[in-house]
Image (cartoon, rainbow, N blue to C red):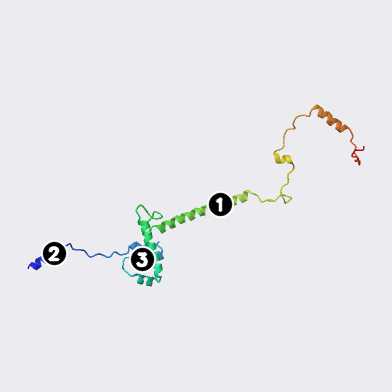
Amino acid sequence: MSSRTTKRSKSKSTPVRRRPRARGTPKWIQTQKDLDEVARRRCLMVLSVLSGERPVTEAIAEAQISRQLYYLLEDKALRAMIAVLTPSSTGESGVSVAESPAKRIAELEAKVSKLEKEKRRSERLLLLTRKIVRPGPIKTSSGGRPRRTSRSSRKGPASTTRGPKPSPASRATSATATTEPTTPSTPTPDGEAVQ
């Protein structure tokens, strides 16, 4: 009897361990519609290998990829997990991975509608401009650069006043110059004018 009592006492003193339950794949990975199909398959493949459900050889044979590509995908997946799970980090865009494609699509649709409005506005402005600005010649009449009429037009607008009156001396000079007849001079070899 002593052997039976010792067995019972031993079993009472050691705690009973529950058998570990297998953790299934999260359901949202399999059911959510807006996830990329290739990304979903790759994620399930990496998770099944990392959990020990399947060996690498079996996973790459089923996926028909090289071993090098599998390890590259596994490395990228682990790096992304570490980046997202780092304390005080919410990921690249601040949303969970499951929400990001739907949110990105909504942002892009809003951007497209904004750009369509801007395009319609620009087309209306062009139409109004064509109605207001009448067609006409693009070049000047001579076909070259426009001519300038005088030097004074380059400097600024012409004067609107006549200026001061001439002095009495200049009036007398201009009066005599108009009354005296002028005769043309003929040049000579010595340089003197002959009249």
Q: Which mark is residue 122?
A: 1
Mark 2 or mark 1: which comes first in sequence?
2
Asked if 89 appears above or below 192 in the picture, the reply is below
Estimate the x, y position of residue 96 in percent, counting from the top left: 37, 56
Quadrant where the C terminus sits is top right
User: 68 or 22: nearer the eye?
Assistant: 68
Q: How many marks?
A: 3
Which corner quadrant of the image does residue 151 belong to? top right
Judge depth for marks 2 and 3 and give the one in front. Answer: 2
- CA gap between label 2 and label 3 equals 43 Å
Badge 3: residue crowd in 10 Å (few <14, some 14–19, many ≥20): many
Asked if 160 appears above or below 82 in the picture, the reply is above
In the rendered image, which residue does mark 3 sit on?
A: 46
SS for tag 2? helix
Q: Residue furthest top?
A: 168
Badge 2: residue crowd in 10 Å (few <14, some 14–19, many ≥20): few
In the rendered image, which residue does mark 2 sit on?
A: 10
